[in-house]
Amino acid sequence: HIEEAGITEEYVGFATLPNQVHRKSVKKGFDFTLMVAGESGLGKSTLVNSLFLTDLHKDRKLLNAEERIRQTVEITKHTVDIEEKGVKLKLTIVDTPGFGDAVNNTEPITQYIDQQFEQYFRDESGLNRKNIQDNRVHCCLYFIPPFGHGLRPVDIEFMKALQDKVNVVPLIAKADCLTPLEIKKLKERLREEIDKYGIKIYQFPDCDSDEDEEFKQQDKDLKESTPFAVIGSNTVVEARGQRVRGRLYPWGIVEVENPSHCDFVKLRTMLIRTHMHDLKDITSDCHYENYRAQCIQNMTRSVFHSPLAPLSPPCVYPAPLQLRRMQQMLQKMQQQMHEQEL
Amino acid sequence: MSDVVPPEVRPKPAVPAKPPNVGAPSPSSPFPPQGLGVGGGGISAPPPSAIPVPIGSHGPSHGGSHGMGHGVGHGVSHAGSHSGSHSSSAGSTLLGYIGIDTIIEQMRKKTMKTGFDFNIMVVGHSGLGKSTLVNTLFKSQVSRRSAGWARDEKIPKTVEIKSVSHVIEEGGVKMKLTVVDTPGFGDQINNDNCWEPISKYINEQYEKFLKEEVNITRKKRIPDTRVHCCLYFISPTGHSLRQLDIEFMKRLSHSVNIIPIIAKSDTLTTEERQEFKQRVRKELEMSGIEFYPQKEFDEDMEDKSDNDKIREAMPFAVVGSDKEYQVNGKRVLGRKTAWGIVEVENPNHCEFAQLRDFLIRSHLQDLKEVTHNIHYETYRAKRLNENGGLHPISSTDTQESNL
């Protein structure tokens, strides 16, 4: 703390800068977009509810098998405002129902992520930048079923398709059907395979050397327990004299927030309490910048080569749909500016 | 005695403590202890008397915002909305606490690591104590004069722009402070257009930033050389503003934050000072000069009331000094004369302390934000409207950009 010392002190006062910065941020509030992906029935919605103490899916209808066959992967968004100790968070959960049931699972999702980037790019390049809404996906929790023996082809394909667009955090779902030893083996197996296939999942940044020991230990524990094995629950049970979130089985009670039962607490700590800001930073500094650089290069190439001619056949340029949209956007922007001048 | 109420320093927001240690491990037995005293502690104890309660039964109903598009953005305050039995009581592991407020701590760590930039420009004719004042403000030798320039160097024939940077640190916060001096301003016989080099410099910094922003591969942190604050020194004539003062401020108040101050105010008695300030304020108003903090950028009632107080007290009448003297057993910065010591930080003597509190302790960040969100955006919009559009330039592109 800096005390307001007496008249003559060597104290200038700009040490209050961080507080000045944060005062504004607190006033404005924060936002965070979390995507959940994985087959249906892996407890995604329940986990999200447990993480944010919400009940976002009260009235949802679970589809039967027949209905599922006709499914394509949908993208649904739920937004909720949460406030805690004066800090406001606008949380958006992007769900991907139908994943795993459809033929083409990955494309609708990568398209969605790109769309958010495109929207942000437009806003950022536009004239009125005062209140840009950031809908970019900051983190994608990918649920791996606990029943297998490692990554399946769909897992590998999905994570590789998304690794350069979003922070991918793989999770072992419904971990309460595994014994601790099985979990350990599965985690090792998964880590090996992630390495082997060169899948770039979200990496925790290294701790500063000047952090206290407690924090460093916590950080080490986090890094060593990935991928997290999680359980979620929408029900409260009585255990050891307390009311806790849990699942009641005839052979015992699984407590969601008990670190010896599952990694839920670790996930929550990482996602919300220690790395939320970093997730947003990486999204904005790496994933978004990559997208933007790619976009601009495509745009410039097309503008310089054929400003008036119609767009070349798709085999010449990558992602022609994107390119055309970018060109349209540029033209629209210029039109708007000319209209403003009049 | 001065009857001007010193502007309030904004209260520092409480920095939240580090997040409580989460999840103290406690092994749970497979069979939770009996609470009802039914039967003995046999091995095959009856199942625990736990009744799952759906969470949705507590607090205000969300009304399930599902489906495409945005949910109803109502604020659900979780800290208090759980039913009494599982609100966060001391000791119990956080059933009702998510931990969102820790993002502030995360941000603060990050910003402390990256450090801050601040660029301040001083404008006024020579001899008004600009360099001394800046040194006094930041309690270090940060101005150009201290960087080894001769004290008796000649006044330049045209306005020059000279900038000097230093990194100063306080309380773990590192700040790269750049002081931009403008020797030659107002010193000629004919001072026509002497604001032009200054205006050009300010716009050049905006242009630099803009170019970085539209680059294909952008730097993670674009170096910020834009002028965040321009201290304009008014000569303490006691009469009124000079024509040059009005011309300068009129032309530049829309591209940079201008803070007018009355320099060397120890030549004015308290009454003279009050009168002069009122007259200056009136003239500024009549000329339509919006100095910082500009009324139109007050964001909410709280801002407005804070800033109104400051606007009433401006322009601050200041005295600068880098010499220390003993007064009443304390060491103070001041100017020693035959009739007494002018104490720089004494609010009864001059308004330096108020200027410092306003500039550094409460509005430093705001100065940067207004520069970035308003002045820079104005410049950028103007540039985008010229030449029919802005094309991104690659850093390796040797072609002429379309700007």
Image (cartoon, coloured by chain):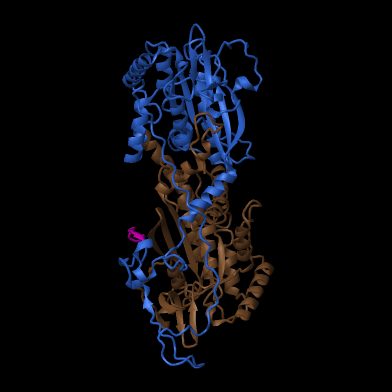
Chain colours: A brown, B blue
Q: Give the quarter of the image for residue A243.
A: bottom left
Q: Residue B121: percent from the left, percent from the top?
A: 52, 25
Say if the magenta span includes residue B75. yes
Q: Give the quarter of the image for residue B161.
A: top right
Asked if A36 appears above or below A336 in the picture, the reply is: below
Q: Residue A12: percent from the left, percent from the top?
A: 53, 32
Asked if A103 appears above or below B307 in the picture, the reply is: below
Asked if B186 appears above or below B40 in the picture, the reply is: above
Q: Residue furthest front?
A: B329
Asked whether the viewer can see residue A26, the reply is yes
Asked whether the viewer can see residue B255, the reply is no
User: What's the magenta region?
Assistant: B70-77
Q: Main secondary structure of the magenta part?
A: loop
Asked if A103 appears above or below A32 in the picture, the reply is: below
Please state which of residues B121 and B350 is positioned toward the viewer in this rendering.
B350
Say if the magenta span includes residue A10. no
Q: Is residue A70 left or right of residue B283?
A: right
Q: Is residue B114 left or right of residue B373?
A: right
Please state which of residues A23 and A142 is positioned toward the viewer in this rendering.
A23
Q: Is residue A169 left or right of residue A132?
A: right
- The residue located at (44%, 71%) in the rendering is A45
Q: Residue B314: percent from the left, percent from the top?
A: 38, 24
Q: What is the quadrant of the C terminus of chain A in the image?
A: top left
Q: Residue A219: percent from the left, percent from the top?
A: 61, 61
Please state which of residues B366 and A5 is positioned toward the viewer in this rendering.
A5
Number of callouts in the render?
0
Q: Residue furthest top?
A: B189
